[in-house]
Amino acid sequence: MAADRSTVETDRPFVARMTKPEDDPAAFARAVDALDRGELVAVPTETVYGLACDATNPDAVARLYAAKGRPAINPLIAHVPDIEAAAREGELDARAERLGRAFWPGPLTLVAKRGTMCRVTPAACAGRPTLALRVPAAPLMQALARALDRPIAAPSANLSGRVSATTADDVIADLGPAVAVVLDAGPCPIGVESTIVDLSGEPARLLRPGGLARAEIEAALGAPLADPPASAAQSPAAPGLLTSHYAPSAAVRLDVGEVRNGEALLAFGPVLPDGAKRAVAVVNLSPTGDLAEAATNLFQALRRLDRTGATTIAVAPIPAEGLGEAIRDRLARAAAPRPTD
Ligand code: TXA
Ligand code: MG
């Protein structure tokens, strides 16, 4: 498979199938070398695929923003191998220490003040005084951050505003020629991005629900997480919260009780909405109603239904508890009014 892809038309991207560095040391070395030279590398994490670059290199960061078509006001997450490395880049207070020790490595991103020794180039933080830090559990991203010995900036490996990528094929479809190396470890196990908690001020705020459920974080913190400031949803000052995002080409209709003619159906659980037989295509996120399974399947399901050419994707009701909060958040953004393009 990898050889097929890397021999068509251009030599980009070089694709290697592996789940850990030892599977293909030469390909891993090629990925480290590409990062070191300021190139872009697609890497799986436990959440989604990331489009990685050296976070300390302004040229690499500029290349990354250009490849994604990402607005320069939207800052990136810096990936580091452990909490000690995180503490060298950001100011981790007692709350951050507690959450980092409880959940890193894993699907949690903490926003802290930039440290005085922070090496992340200011452009990667969109000029803000804060820095988003994550210690990923997936072995390839872990090992890359350790081998490079510099923080790795990695947004989700999709075109800006579109559906995130949870397979290497989806990354290549969106970003192929811009990427030097793709490490392909198969589909990502969690399937939605990390949960982002802002600890740069008081109180701690949940900026983005994600792969770690709110209740687990609140239990470790011993306090509830506040919502983002009310004005944040549309404000360019809070780009992480831009409303329209994760958008397929099709329109998205949420919490449907009945499927309409011509719609594709994104189902959840054993009971389908009325009129399900009318749907031009059906994908069930989890026939048993398991929210973790639904999260794993979410982005691939949206991409699949979009490829059917249906004008609208009708989404069955999904409960808001556990990972359901992240799933509902992504679907609400997919359904939000889009900027005219
Ligand atoms: O699971 C994940 O978090 C994936 C994998 C690749 O690690 N990454 C990811 O990155 O989802 P991205 O760029 O697609 O989303 C990062 C979010 C953006 O919404 C951005 O606005 C927000 O984090 N963010 C980054 N730095 C921030 C900061 N200093 N303050 C507030 N929000 C920030
Ligand atoms: Mg993203």
Image: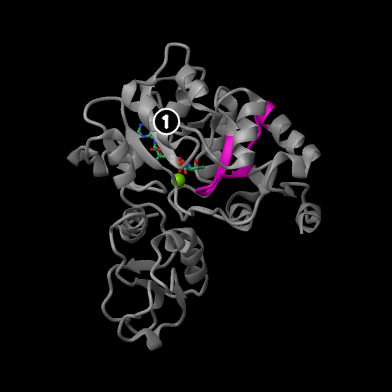
Q: Residue furthest top?
A: 116
Can residue 74 be seen at all in this image of the molecule? no
In the rendered structure, the answer to whether residue 284 lies left or right of residue 142 reads: left
Span colored in magenta: 35-52
Please check the rendered image and state whether residue 37 is part of the magenta-colored stretch, yes or no: yes
Q: Where residue 297 sits: x, y (%)? A: 48, 63
In the rendered structure, the answer to whether residue 277 lies left or right of residue 36 reads: left
Colour option used: one colour
Quadrant where the N terminus is found in the figure: bottom right
Residue 150 at x, y percent in the picture: 59, 23
CB at disc 1 and ligand 1 closer than 8 Å: no
Residue located at (26% from left, 36% from top): 205
Q: Amino acid at mark 1?
A: Gly
Q: Residue at x 53, y 29 (%)?
A: 80
x, y percentage for residue 302? 46, 65
- Determine the image quadrant of residue 97: top left
Element carrying mark 1: helix
Q: Nearer the viewer, residue 58 or 230?
A: 230
Q: Residues within 10 Å of mark 1 (few under 14, many from 20)?
A: many
Q: Residue under circle 1?
A: 100
